[in-house]
Structure formats: C-alpha cells, structure tokens
Image: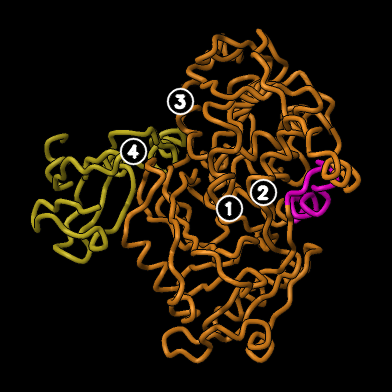
Chain colours: A orange, B yellow
Amino acid sequence: MRFSGLRVLKEGLTGNKGWTPHWRNPEPKAEYDVIIIGGGGHGLATAHYLASVYGITNVAVLEKGYLGGGNVGRNTTIVRANYGLPGNSEFYSYSLKLWEGLEKDLNYNVMHSQRGIINLFNSDGSRDAAARRGNQMVSQGDDAQLLDTAALRKMLPYLDFDQTRFPIYGGLYHSRGGTARHDAVAWGFARAADQRGVDLIQQCEVTGIDVVDGVVKGVQTTRGPIRAKKIGITAAGRSSEVAAMAGMRLPIESHVLQAFVTEGLKPMIDTVITYEAGHFYISQSDKGGLVFGGSLDLYSSYASRGNLPMAEHVIESACTLMPAITKAKVLRSWGGIMDMSADGSPIIDKTHIDGLYVNCGWCYGGFKATPGSGHVFAHLMATDNPHRVATKHRLDRFRTGVGIMDEEASGSQHNLH
Amino acid sequence: MRLPCPICGERDIREFYYQGADVALNRPAPDAGDDAWQDYVYLRENQPGEHRDLWQHESGCGSWIVVSRNTVTHEVTGAKLAKDIKRIEA
C-alpha cells in the first residue's frame, strides 16, 4: 500500500478500515543470499538499500527482539553533518543528503525536521575551533554560520548568557541539521524493505555463525539454522557478542549513555542546542518533552541504564544553561548500549572471514548515520568494495595504525571517547 | 555504583578514573609485533556479564585497582590492588 494525502482522506471517510500491517511476519526460509544480523536502524536501512539500489532481494533481517527495539528506539533523534575529519566529513554529508530525500524514497513520514543545530561555545579558543569546524563543513559543501551573542539572544532568549561559570561567547549554526522521529525511521526502512521482498524475522536470535575453511556458510538461530552466502553484522552495542560467534574480537567497548525527557511543555526550543561546557545537548520533541543528554557514564556496561552521578551532572548543565528548565519535571530517563570504537569513528568493512561483514563502532552518534550507514554497507556487501564515501572506515586501521580517525582529537584509546 | 577501594573502603564512583578492561595490566614486549599490540591496545572481549576492569582511585589514595563487577547488573563483587595482582602473576 502506498501512503498519500489522498489515501489518508479516503481512509478517514471510510472508517480507516483499509489500512494493512506495515510488513509481513514471514517464517525463515532455509537459505538467503544475504542475512543481516540485527533489525535496528542500520540493519533495516542496509536491507532497504540492498533491495532498492543493488537489486538483492533474497535477504533476511534477523532480530532477536522486535524491529527498532535497540538504539534506534532509544536515542535523542539528532540529525547533522558537522564532522571535520576526512572520511567522516564526506560520509555524514552524504548521509544528510539521503535524509533530505528519505521520506520520498521510503514513502513514509519519518518527521525529518531541519530545525537547525546551534553548537554554543564558551571561550575564545573554542570560538576558533568552531570557526575552523564551520569552514570544514562549508568546504565539504554543507552549511555553517558563526553567530555572535547578539544573534543568539534573538534566537534563544531563554539561555543564561551572562553567567559567571560558562558565559556564552557565540554559536556555530548548522541550519540543515535537526531531528527526526526515531521509531518512524526504523519502521519506514522496515516497510520499504519488506515491500521489495526482504524477510524481516523477529524473535529470532542468532546463536552461532557457521564458518567452514574461512568461509561463512550461515547462522544458527533460535528458530533453526539458516544458510547464507553473505552475512552482515549490524548489532550496535551487541556487536562484540555477535562477532565472538565467529571467533572474532572487535576494537569495541560497550558503554552506557543516558538520556532524559521532561514532561510535555508548550513550544519553547525550536532548534537543537549543544553546550560544550557540559557536553550537553537539548531539543524539544513534537510532543513537547525536552529531550536532553550529556556524556557517557564512562565505564563498560550492558545494563541499559546508568548511574546517578552522570544524571546529576547532565541536569546541572541544563540548569546552568537555561535556568527556566528547573521548573520542568523529568518524566523519564534511560540508557542505551553504545558500541564505542577505540578512535570514536565507525567500522564498515569486510572481515578476514569470506562473506562476513561488520558495521559497528557508531559510538553515541549512530542515529544520524542510519541512511548513510545502510547505503554504504549495502554497497560493500553487494560489490565487495567500499562505497566512495566510506573508504576510510577500515577494520585494520587499529592493527596498522594507519588511518585512525580520532574526530575529537582526544587520543585513540577506549576510555577517551 | 560504589567501588570498594582495598585501602579506603567503599567510595563513590566519582572518586575513580576508569582505564578500561584489565588487559591493560599485560603490556606486551616492545617488539611483540602488530598483532600483540593490537590485542593490547584495541581488541576487547567485551562480553556482557562478569568483567574485570582497571580503575584509579584518583580522588582518594591514588591506587590502581582491579574491580570485578557484572556489566549487566552493575553489581560490584570485589576489588584488588593492581600491584598485588601483578605480583601474583609474575
């Protein structure tokens, strides 16, 4: 079924009886050309692009829970292309362009809203860094504008500009950045892939990866063995667990990142604001909740929840930046399992096992990458060559030391990102 | 999460600096080769459940400690001074 304004009108007038499920619920077949392990944003996007761009439709996405139940359903929904390093810069630029055409491509309303992102800075040094970052973004063909406090006061009158602790010196404005409805992104990719014949198999946990003489042959699952010529791992925070089934260790540590949302409020924040002093970011959802977060708790964790010290730190940052938020009540907080790579950049590559591919290491920034990640991973799996915007995301950079992508310049070490 | 420093007793996690998996205690020889150094610096088991990691009680006694804890439940089951573990293994 295609969605359209006319269809909404027709269904509205006929009791909404014509809507059908977004996707089938098929039994797994004995064999597929391609198996994707992990039915989250990146896995579903990979399946969509395999089918729509590369014509490979004999594909199964295996998901141990329900579609979109991992990080794509637990993030703070920010979409942007403001990276600086060669490799990341062109990749995220490409991904943002895919976002801009995504709703037409998927025939699905993912509520992509280019409401802009403002990265506030709090010192002369960070103003210089923001100016340089802005120039890098413009050089890449994206947009960036350095704003002074006079311009910011008009846009964000509720910030505490003159505080003594971290006074606001200005901001870098990325007007094409924004947010999207995170669940809808997963659902849109799932529906589009399903319509092209991809089997989305839920409640199907992979328990083993069959490798014979260095060649991947298939997987063992809770719903029986399934053979495949090629297997892609898109398991986010669980990547190391899945890779271990093929005898591999990855340069990944899984960490917890917390996020918070307040009760629904009247429209207040019509953009996304980040505040470097506290590594804090905030936006307002279409339901009215203020959605915000900060840094990792910074210890290895699979708990999907964090500890109170980081919650306190994030909320202190919120109160320092915009005192009005002290009147709001926090409704919910949660944690996600982040696949932190040692240099803070993703890995999209073949492995030493023929037919086995990994797509991981998205750290705390995987959501905005969803269409780009899916597209380049589909390209890699279909052609066995990296996509032109993902040539630098190699797995062997950690062995050779060549091509380490430390975007934050904090050092390539597990506890520094 | 509170960590039991063997010298200072149980303390708030904010007093500690997190280094990472206790693989950091097993530094290879300088000429051990790329694979050994990749193992040491980058590759991690990273499986959910029981985990041993290295922390420094930087706002306390300054000791490096190896903490045993469960990464799924955040239960902390013990901590030993890293220097004692090195001595046992040596």
Q: Is residue B28 in sight in this rendering?
A: no
| In front: label 4 or label 2 | 4
Q: Are marks 2 and 1 on the same chain?
A: yes
**Marker disc for residue A365:** 1
The kind of secondary structure element at disc 1 is: loop
Q: Which residues are magenta?
A: A93-110
| In front: label 3 or label 2 | 2
- Write down the chain letter for disc 1: A
Q: CA distance from mark 3 to mark 4?
A: 18 Å
Q: CA distance from mark 4 to mark 2?
A: 27 Å
Q: Are marks 1 and 4 on the same chain?
A: no
- Comparing A313 with A260, the one in front is A260
Which residue type does callout 1 highlight? Gly
Vertical placement of B55 versus A230: above or below? below
**Marker disc for residue A244:** 3
Q: CA distance from mark 2 to mark 1?
A: 7 Å
The local crowd at label 4, few if under 14, some if 14 to 19, many if 20 or more residues have their Cα within 10 Å, is some
Q: CA distance from mark 3 to mark 2?
A: 25 Å
- Write down the chain letter for disc 2: A
Reading the image, the residue beneath label 2 is: A369
The local crowd at label 3, few if under 14, some if 14 to 19, many if 20 or more residues have their Cα within 10 Å, is some
Q: Quadrant of the N terminus of chain A?
A: top right
Q: Is residue A64 magenta?
A: no
Q: CA distance from mark 1 to mark 3?
A: 24 Å
Q: Quadrant of residue A351?
A: top right
Identity of the residue drawn at 57% across and 37% down = A396
Coordinates of residue A398 in the picture (x, y in percent): 52, 42
Image position of A294 (left or right of A310): right
1 or 3: tag closer to the N-terminus: 3
Q: Is residue A105 magenta?
A: yes
Coordinates of residue A269 in the picture (x, y in percent): 62, 73
Q: Residue furthest right?
A: A6
